Image (tube, rainbow, N blue to C red):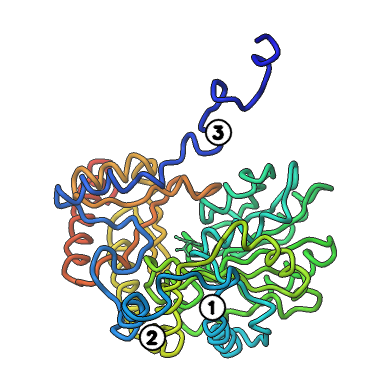
Amino acid sequence: MAARDKLVGTFKTLQGGLFSTVTKADVGTALNDLIKNGCALMCWADPFFPDHVIPSHVENAAVRSLQEGMGPHYTMPIGDAELKTLIAAKLSKTHGITINPERNLVVTPGSDSGLLFAMMPFIGAGDEVLIHAPSYPSNFLNPGLLGGIAVPVPTRPENNYQIEIDEYRKRLTKNTKMVLLTQPNNPTTTVQRKERLEELAKFVVENDLILVVDYAFEDIVYDGIEMYDISRFEGMWERTLSVYSISKGMALSGLRVGYVVADDKLMDVLFACAVNVIGATNTSAQQAAIAAFRDYAFISDYKAIFDKRRRKVFDCFNSIPGVSMSLPESSYLSWVDISRLGTAAEVSQYILKNANVFVNEGTPYGLGGEGHLRIVHGCYRSEDVVDQALDRIKTALTRLAAEKGIR
Ligand SMILES: Cc1ncc(COP(=O)(O)O)c(C=O)c1O
């Protein structure tokens, strides 16, 4: 008995560990209560949520695959061959890269699992991953799941959250193994410019690191800002794992389809563990994704909707005393500076109570997140619902500003 008491990791000693304070997974129950009370949800980075929006050719493909196709069966663990060929054709157009779809691509159940999958074989105990902050919370948690350490690298609003290579250099240690880049970034919407990417590429090559790029929002970039593919810089293709999603630009989050692209050497490792970790991505979802990649003109329609909305939120928030935001460079997210009105927790609670709108505090996005709110203006299909929610936030925050003597 005495010997067993010393065991670590038995049921008696279990705690929530890394996830003891993370509430993302069970947030649904809380949201349902808010919905019942007529609360507008501007907190879920799920385009048009909760409205029914899907192109008919995509919907039909999913239904057909269940009714008369291979829907009830597995695909290969690495993904459907036709889907991979279509993805490769899109990447050649949008990223200027030529890949072999049979060798350089694996389909994953969404990009959240793709991001962990891409990191998993390469990060172990004590390995450090440099991640610019503020950024997507899951990316800070993933290294810890593998026994590694996430090392936040600050970016600054006055610099439009562009990465600064000296900040990476300062944090480089003998344990640094990987850099993670979210391009475009959630929550700041920043698109890293080609010059910054080139500096990062040199840093990665010089220090013999691996790079993981999270491209979840890549389809929704405005004003012709270039989305240069960092794997095109010399020495980078062989050390870059690029992770993509159909959740955001295609607004097909519920299908849970993502994909990882990498050179043969890295991909061999991923192929080797695909069957253990992924099994296979949902077959009907892959059939629907095939339809989406065959004809993805609908992405431009969605982008036009979000483009109009970003201008609307920009005008709205900048007209509130003590509140400011930059025009989003990408996505359907607003990164709003409310620091003059209170902490992120105080102001988000004030909005919930006084405007009946649920928004995200900036703090979970890491360094630099305090004093900010992330507001998902890409929710709902109805412009009226969004307009009314924005009006209510504006009225509430204008009152809060007046109470604080800010005009
Ligand atoms: C930056 C970023 N990456 C990845 C994901 C994961 O998306 P999915 O798993 O739906 O592909 C999200 C979801 O919000 C995200 O914001």
Query: Picture coordinates of residue 81 (x, y %)?
Result: 57, 82
Q: Is 234 in front, or is 93?
A: 93
The residue at which mark 1 appears reads as 80
Name the residue type under label 2. Ser
Placement of 355 over or under 291, stated as above or below:
above
Front residue of this view, candidates 381 and 225: 381
Relative placement, left or right, of 311 versus 150 is: left
Farthest residue in the top direction?
2
In which quadrant of the rendered view does residue 202 lie? bottom right
Circle 3 residues within 10 Å: few <14, some 14–19, many ≥20:
few
Q: Which mark is residue 300?
A: 2
Tag in front: 2 or 1: 1
Alpha carbons under labels 3 and 1: distance apart: 36 Å
Residue 17 tag number: 3
**Closest to the observer, 308 or 255:** 255
Left or right, residue 178 beside residue 114: right
Q: Quadrant of residue 335?
A: bottom left
Look at the numbered disc 3 and give the secondary structure of its residue.
helix
Q: Which numbered mark, 3 or 1, is in the foreground of this view?
A: 1
Above or below 168: residue 1 = above
Q: Earlier in the sequence, mark 2 or mark 1?
A: 1
Amino acid type, residue under disc 3 in the picture: Gly
Whether label 3 touches label 1, CB < 8 Å: no
Quarter location, residue 213: bottom right
Q: Position of residue 148 (x, y in %)?
A: 69, 44
Do the CB atoms of the residues marked 3 and 2 lie less than 8 Å apart?
Answer: no
What's the CA distance linking mark 2 and mark 1? 25 Å
